[in-house]
Image: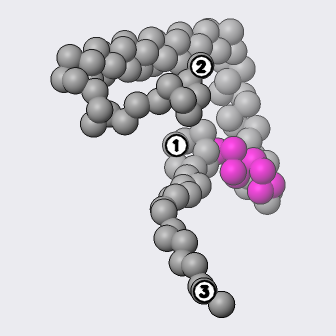
Amino acid sequence: MANIDNLKPRTDLSSEEAKKMGSKGGIASVKARKEKKLFKEEIERQLGSSLEAIVQAAIDKAKDGDIRAAEFLRDTSGQGIVNKIELTEIPIIKDDL
């Protein structure tokens, strides 16, 4: 686990170290994508036609005005709202008062 004492800026890495770290990141990314795909396939396999029934029930509820059902459909279809917080450095100005 990383902590503040063992973190290095990428600019301090040699090209060989940067390449090695990038390779590790790429491998981890592929592994994560495969796991997500397998998880999704397993859910679909277990639910089978039940998945269609769940989606249809959500559609019916959304049509009746159920906001949570509408949010579920929006998010499931990939149109969810992304909450993005951008952190920026704010200079500290000291007053000599």
Instruction: State the residue at coordinates (53%, 18%).
Output: 36
Q: Quadrant of residue 45 in the image?
A: top right
**Helix, strand or loop status at disc 2:** loop
What residue do we see at 52% from left, 58% from top? 87
* Residue under numbered circle 3: 96
Q: Which residues are magenta?
A: 66-73
Q: Secondary structure at mark 3?
A: loop
Which residue has dot 2 on it? 1
Residue 26: tell me if it is visible. no
Give the image location of residue 38, x and y in percent: 53, 10
In the depicted structure, whether residue 22 falls above or below residue 31: below
How is the rendered protein coloured? one colour
Residue bearing the label numbered 1? 78
Image quarter (top left, top right, bottom left or bottom right) of the C terminus: bottom right
The quadrant where residue 25 appears: top left
Type of amino acid under label 3 = Asp
